[in-house]
Image: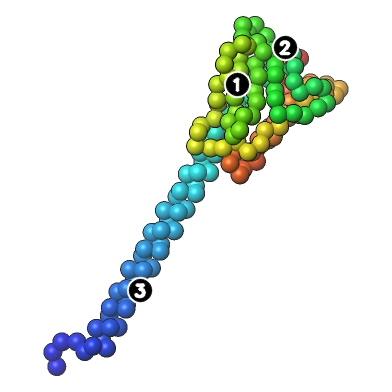
């Protein structure tokens, strides 16, 4: 007997189809996982960059203008020691964090690939030996980030 019967051909075709389908599903899942990881890394890098900018502004501050002592708000205004473009003002405009130096136009700090969902600055009073601080709560895309930055005495 030479050749394959119709039943054998259908079975072999089905097996090849199952193998190819399984391979495509696996490749799709790997690509999707890679994309999710890439987005998470970009979000974390962006949040770390923004938190370092806030830290730079607060760590060398001679005074905090906003938020008021013991209050919270969406605007941070500080005066830095020996800095000619005081005050530094950080705020949230739509889904972008802006920095305004003195009377200059505000500059957007975050990458356009990420959206800032929320930004809250809370001014913490000095207690004992602990200096005054600014607590920052920030949501980039859907990930929350938080930091507390202390003023130098």
Looking at the rendered structure, the secondary structure element under dot 1 is strand
- Disc 1 to disc 3, how far (Cα)? 56 Å
Residue that lies at the very extreme toward the left in this rendered image:
2
Q: Compared with residue 116, is residue 86 higher up or lower down, i.e. above or below? A: above
Instruction: Examine the image and state in which quarter residue 89 appears.
Output: top right
What residue sits right under mark 2 in the picture? Answer: 62
Residue placed at 58% from the left, 31% from the top? Answer: 96
Of 10 and 48, nearer the camera is 10
Q: Residues within 10 Å of mark 1 (few under 14, many from 20)?
A: many
Residue placed at 28% from the left, 78% from the top? Answer: 13
Looking at the rendered structure, the secondary structure element under dot 3 is helix
Q: Compared with residue 115, is residue 68 higher up or lower down, i.e. above or below? A: above
Is the N terminus in the top left, top right, bottom left or bottom right quadrant?
bottom left
Examine the rendering and report whether any part of residue 48 can be seen.
no
Nearest to N terminus: mark 3 or mark 2: 3
Q: Compared with residue 73, is residue 102 higher up or lower down, i.e. above or below? A: above
């Amino acid at each position: 007997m030479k050749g394959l019967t119709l039943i054998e051909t259908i079975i072999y075709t089905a097996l090849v189809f199952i193998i190819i389908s399984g391979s495509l599903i696996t490749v799709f899942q790997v690509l999707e996982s890679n994309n999710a990881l890439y987005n998470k890394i970009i979000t974390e890098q962006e949040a770390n960059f923004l938190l370092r900018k806030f830290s730079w502004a607060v760590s060398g501050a001679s005074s905090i203008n906003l938020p008021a002592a013991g209050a919270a708000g969406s605007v941070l205004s500080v005066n830095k020691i020996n800095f000619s473009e005081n005050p530094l003002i950080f705020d949230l405009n739509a889904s972008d964090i802006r920095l305004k130096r003195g009377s200059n136009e505000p500059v957007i700090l975050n990458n356009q690939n990420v959206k800032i969902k929320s930004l809250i600055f809370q001014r913490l009073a000095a207690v004992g030996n602990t200096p005054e601080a600014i607590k920052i709560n920030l949501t980039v895309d859907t990930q929350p980030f938080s930091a507390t930055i202390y003023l130098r005495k």
